Amino acid sequence: MATIYQVSELAGVSLATVSRVMNKSTKVSEKTTKKVQEAMAQLNYRPNSIAQSLASNCTNSVGLMVTGLSGAFFGQMMAGIESTLRRAGKHVIITTGHSEETREKDGIEFLKSRNCDALIVHVEAVSDEYLIDICKGDIPIYLIGNYIEEIKENCIALDNELGGYLAATAVLEQGHRNIAYISGPVGKADAQQRLLGHQRALAQYNISDNEQYLFTGNYLDTGGRDGIKHFLDNDLPFSALVCANDEMASGAMTYAREYGLVLPRDLSVVGFDNVIFARHIHPKLTTIENPVYQMGSMAAKLVLKNIYQHNELIIEHHFKPSLVTRNSVAEQIAK
Amino acid sequence: MATIYQVSELAGVSLATVSRVMNKSTKVSEKTTKKVQEAMAQLNYRPNSIAQSLASNCTNSVGLMVTGLSGAFFGQMMAGIESTLRRAGKHVIITTGHSEETREKDGIEFLKSRNCDALIVHVEAVSDEYLIDICKGDIPIYLIGNYIEEIKENCIALDNELGGYLAATAVLEQGHRNIAYISGPVGKADAQQRLLGHQRALAQYNISDNEQYLFTGNYLDTGGRDGIKHFLDNDLPFSALVCANDEMASGAMTYAREYGLVLPRDLSVVGFDNVIFARHIHPKLTTIENPVYQMGSMAAKLVLKNIYQHNELIIEHHFKPSLVTRNSVAEQIAK
DNA sequence: TTGTAGGCGTTATCAG
DNA sequence: CTGATAACGCCTACAA
């Protein structure tokens, strides 16, 4: 592997000059530039990025931690991040947190140990204090899908409350009044926000808050299954089911069908996130569009702007969900 | 950020000694080891991995290129790779190839430019010659889901032919004889292998090869849709449909239902890959298990063994698919 | 067992 | 505009 030194020799210039033509930092005469470029081509020279990093104290790599690599949700998010970072010539180093506190902390440490220029993380288990704390640390960290007031400049988040509200109105407007809700885990902020939005919509329709219609799931299809089982077993009258994400909606639908219900005739279902498979399940799922790809892309832009001086970029910290109407909600005729 | 030099000062030893206790390379007396560790703790010392890389010519990072980040298939693959690499303290740098030749080549170059110790790639568009060529290059490259005779030691692959065979037998054994097949793109080796296995199974049942029953899809749900449309429009009698992957099976099923067919009564369907959503679609898809997670993990082990001297690891280059029987295949009574 | 010193391939700060 | 030369933080013979 040729080094910058050999290039300088062959071109008959100093090593500093070679560095200059690479980085276009200072002006170099056209003539010498050409000489250098020819020498580089002849030697098939490739700069050693590690050496560059050491000398410049900039690794051109950003660390990314997500809960898991599989799963449509994070796939979209990663895709958004990777594509805009890659276009800017930045490398993304990836790791997982598995939604467990120690593993999330370990993951962040792991990324830090690699001298990333910045971190983009989607955490679920770690406390806000911890995040605020490391935000003050040596390496900048950006949060996606997580809004913390104290460090809001570093956050890209979705208006989950609005999403929950929209999901509820999707069935309310079709005449449903007995609406079961399968929520996400208590500990997760987005789950709480979605539930709040749901309750706001119900209140608007003068439906009193009823614990009976609430089940706390785990964001997995098993949670949907357990939830609908719970409602069915309790002999509750309900014509609609709103789930805090698509996985749970899918699990619930599968079980409902096994139970003998015809969808959406006997039960209307709404999901959340609009993951890819939402249109594969039958009936096609009415759900809430969660613009994760764009949010990922925006998080990447945020680091480009703050860390790599792409000052022209315009940052939008808040994203709005929207309703995607498909076939899983039927009209409910008032009795 | 403290450096090794400051640690050495505080501990009252030479800088080389500090390096030694970090790397456990040479023996260091217990006493000095302790002194050094205390100094490190006191200064909250973290080694600079970039400097380590430059000096040792080992970055402890492996590059990974996949077609896309979203999608259940690659998610599983990445998960397998990341988890075993992470456990070994290796960082994974990720990028995408998008199944296009130039982008795949660019992706590999991009990874190379980062001085990864090795590359793991899943390519679809690039030629075998190209791969064989870069295998001889400076940086070791490993292929997943791609078998090339000349560099088989660097490949981790699935027996796709067997998979195709198993998928066909799933319907043949239920009495189906008129079997439509939606294949993957002509250019992809795995698609060809799956088709070959399909044809072998048909031959065993003395079913003559019939072009009419073959449609070439794109591995996306739209391909499934186009495929079944094609068969339906051609007024072919067929009671079963085998698809070369689950996405196409899903697309085909959706369209079949829109067309008015009742599944699996009117049409039995088999997929391939057993991606997550295969159990979410209705009826639950009978498909071929593709052990991508394990293959990813094995690819990671391969680089651990070859690059990082984890000699105890045992490598398995070939993986076998298996049939996952669910509810999308019905028995066909002979007329 | 420990210390010395040269080098890894660049960048960056000075002069010139 | 160009050239020395000192960092950057660590590893690793080679010596002691």
Image (cartoon, coloured by chain):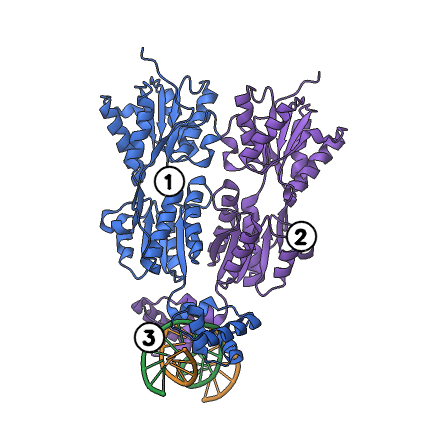
Chain colours: A blue, B purple, C green, D orange
> Which residue appears at 64% of the width and 21% of the height?
B331
Tell me the mark number nearer the camera, choosing from 1 and 3. 1
For numbered disc 2, what is the local secondary structure? loop
Tell me the mark number nearer the camera, choosing from 2 and 3. 2
Give the residue type that dot 3 points to: Gln
Q: Mark 2, chain letter?
A: B
> Which residue is disc 3 drawn over?
B6
Q: Quadrant of the C terminus of chain A?
A: top left
Which one is in front, B190 or B334?
Answer: B190
What number is the disc on residue B148?
2
For numbered disc 1, what is the local secondary structure? loop
- Of pointers 2 and 3, the one earlier in the residue sequence: 3
> Which residue appears at 39% of the width and 62% of the height?
A115
Task: Please determine if labels 1 and 3 lie on a single subunit.
Answer: no
Crowd tier of the residue under label 3, counting other residues whose Cα lies within 10 Å: few below 14, some 14–19, many 20 or above? some
Task: Please determine if labels 2 and 3 lie on a single subunit.
Answer: yes
